[in-house]
Image: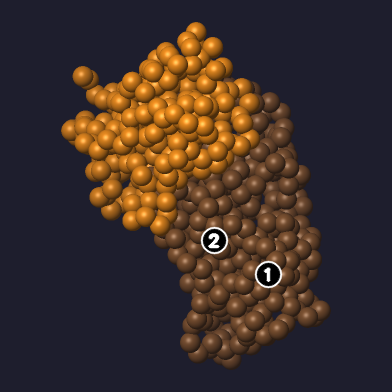
């Protein structure tokens, strides 16, 4: 596979954003996993924020963008992409979400088929972001891709398993969201008192397992 | 210790913010007006990053449960200790049993009560800032309410407890009011080029009104409709406070300190760090304008601002030594 084109832009005076455009590809994300690891060790970098097909580098006030960019572009050409980790996390889900029926209808499927497709895939945590411990998961079956709701819900409960565009994820903190809610899980995605606060890490494998029972 | 008698509209413990867990989706939080926190801390001899109380719109009241040294900074307000007016940006003793009451903000939005020794709440994930979305940090991860009692850390030894402060003549920037429409500098970001010249012009010419549904997460702006040449469906990437996003509504949103760590809306730019303190003080319903600037200009502005707070520290320490 040829190296995907890396685009760099500024995000303010102290950060540079490296991105590859879509479509979502695990191979591309694997390069960003490797890039993040390398960039963590750079002296000029104060913080790395891994995203989907992206890496935001926050630089110290004295770092020069040119030096960082040169280095990152060199790394991009030479790095070895990382593989997903061996960790498999099972997420038990009660598929009783408020948008399940509508989403199924929109896709020309039955709710049971949506659940079957959603649970049949092994997802990979592309990155965490947006909320504490929230995973951007890659691997959603194309039959379940669905544009975000026209108007976001004001309040979506923590633990909601949802689909937004070509991604699926688990809402980790009760918040507004435009994603379609398929179901709910009781798993705590983030606990600030744990040594590792996030249940999931980038590169983890995730499986959704359907559980019976009321919400 | 400090007891909250009236928290006002929205009060929380904030320090310089939380930066170590961005890749876990944990936002920065921290004082909206970072300059006010810095100057207030300098005035009472704290490190820049010590935690303080952030109040919104004024209208709050607190009581000292032991003698402490305080400095109130930020928005223009009328503050009184037991009915006697006190100055903004002055360090003074707040005696056990006394009450500090603050009226509504004359202009501006946020006040900071800095205390020698800092507000002492547990450090969570490297910071004492309240993360309301995460439900941690500050006092039990929530807003302050009447009856809350906050511990104060040990102040630096050998402190001279004599009132001392900054004058408007010497520090006009710290005493500015926020009634005029300020022009905020921004560095254009990737999708700025997705606006044609006419839309770029509209964005720069508009006096954007800060909408009532603005908060610590983001400022929603109302004004003319801005339309990009193409509508892009974007992948989520890291964003920072100050990022100016353009959602499909065509009305920009400026991300503030409680912003999500990632977002996917097109971004027109990022407000420069030095101007974030101004934006934090522009009241809801007032307007702002934007003007592009270079990275070098932004860095110089930040250096100038930092020199400013360094000078405050020197002056306050100097007064201390003379006394």
Q: CA distance from mark 2 to mark 1?
A: 14 Å
Residue A129 as seen in the image, left or right of residue B214: left
In the picture, the disc for residue A3 is none
Residue B212 as seen in the image, left or right of residue A193: right
Residue identifier under label 1: B147
Have a look at marks 2 and 1 and say if they share a chain.
yes
Identify the secondary structure beneath mark 1: loop
From the top left corner, tell me how far across and down residue A158 is, in percent.
Answer: 51, 40
Please indicate, yes or no, whether residue B31 appears anywhere in the rendered image.
Answer: yes
From the top left corner, tell me how far across and down residue A162 is, in percent.
Answer: 48, 28
Residue identifier under label 2: B140
Chain depicted in brown: B
Kindly identify the residue that appears in the image at 42 percent across and 45 percent down: A188
Chain depicted in orange: A
Question: Compared to B275, does B202 lie above or below?
Answer: above
Kindly identify the residue that appears in the image at 48 percent across and 22 percent down: A165
Quadrant, the C terminus of chain B: bottom right
Residue B147 as seen in the image, left or right of residue B261: right
Observer-nearest of B19 and B5: B5
Residue neighbourhood size for the residue with mark 2, other residues' Cα within 10 Å, grouped as few (<14), some (14–19), many (≥20): some
From the top left corner, tell me how far across and down residue A140 is, in percent.
Answer: 38, 21
Q: Outermost residue toward the top?
A: A108
Kindly identify the residue that appears in the image at 57 percent across and 26 percent down: A98
Observer-nearest of A39 and A122: A122
- Going from N to C along the chain, the mark reached first, 2 or 1, is 2
**In terms of image quadrants, where is residue B2?**
bottom right
């Amino acid at each position: 596979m040829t190296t995907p084109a890396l685009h760099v832009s500024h995000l303010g005076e102290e950060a540079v954003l490296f991105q590859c455009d879509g479509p979502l590809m695990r191979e591309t994300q694997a390069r960003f996993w490797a890039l993040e690891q390398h960039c963590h060790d750079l002296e000029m970098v104060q913080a790395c924020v891994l995203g989907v097909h992206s890496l935001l580098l926050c630089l110290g006030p004295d770092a020069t963008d040119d030096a960082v960019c040169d280095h990152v572009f060199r790394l991009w050409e030479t790095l070895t992409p990382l593989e997903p980790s061996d960790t498999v996390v099972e997420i038990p889900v009660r598929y009783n979400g408020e948008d399940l029926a509508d989403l199924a209808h929109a896709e020309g499927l039955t709710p049971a088929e949506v659940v079957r497709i959603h649970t049949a895939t092994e997802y990979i945590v592309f990155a965490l972001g947006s909320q504490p411990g929230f995973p951007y998961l890659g691997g959603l079956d194309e039959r379940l891709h669905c544009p975000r709701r026209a108007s976001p819900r004001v309040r979506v409960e923590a633990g909601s398993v949802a689909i937004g565009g070509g991604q699926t994820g688990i809402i980790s903190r009760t918040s507004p969201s435009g994603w379609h809610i398929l179901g709910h899980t009781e798993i705590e995605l983030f606990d600030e008192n744990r040594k590792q606060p996030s249940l999931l890490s980038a590169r983890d494998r995730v499986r959704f397992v359907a559980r019976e029972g009321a919400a | 210790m400090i007891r909250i008698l009236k928290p006002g509209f929205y009060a929380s413990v904030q320090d310089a913010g939380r930066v170590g867990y961005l890749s876990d989706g944990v936002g920065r939080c921290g004082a909206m007006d970072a300059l006010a926190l810095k100057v207030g801390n300098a005035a009472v001899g704290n490190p820049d990053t010590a935690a303080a109380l952030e109040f919104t719109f004024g209208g709050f009241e607190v009581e000292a449960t032991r003698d402490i040294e305080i400095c109130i900074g930020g928005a223009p307000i009328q503050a009184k200790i037991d009915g006697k007016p006190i100055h903004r940006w002055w360090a003074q003793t707040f005696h056990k049993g006394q009450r500090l009451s603050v009226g509504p903000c004359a202009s501006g939005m946020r006040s900071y009560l800095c205390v020698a020794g800092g507000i002492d709440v547990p450090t969570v994930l490297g910071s004492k800032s309240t993360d309301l979305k995460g439900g941690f940090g500050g006092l039990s991860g929530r807003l302050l309410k009447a009856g809350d009692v906050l511990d104060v850390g040990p102040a630096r030894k050998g402190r001279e407890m004599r009132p001392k402060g900054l004058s408007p003549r010497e520090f006009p920037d710290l005493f500015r009011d926020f009634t005029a429409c300020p022009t905020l500098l921004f560095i254009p970001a990737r999708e700025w080029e997705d606006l044609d010249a006419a839309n770029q012009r509209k964005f720069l010419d508009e006096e954007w009104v800060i909408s009532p549904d603005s908060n610590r997460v983001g400022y929603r702006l109302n004004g003319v409709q801005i339309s990009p040449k193409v509508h892009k469906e974007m992948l989520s990437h890291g964003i920072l406070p100050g990022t100016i996003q353009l959602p499909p509504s065509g009305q920009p949103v400026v991300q503030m300190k409680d912003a999500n760590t990632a977002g996917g809306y097109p971004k027109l730019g990022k407000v420069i760090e030095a101007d974030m303190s101004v934006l934090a003080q522009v009241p809801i319903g007032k307007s702002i304008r934007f003007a592009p600037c270079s990275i070098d200009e932004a860095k110089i502005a930040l250096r100038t601002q930092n020199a400013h707070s360094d000078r405050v520290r020197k002056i306050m320490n100097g007064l201390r030594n003379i006394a």
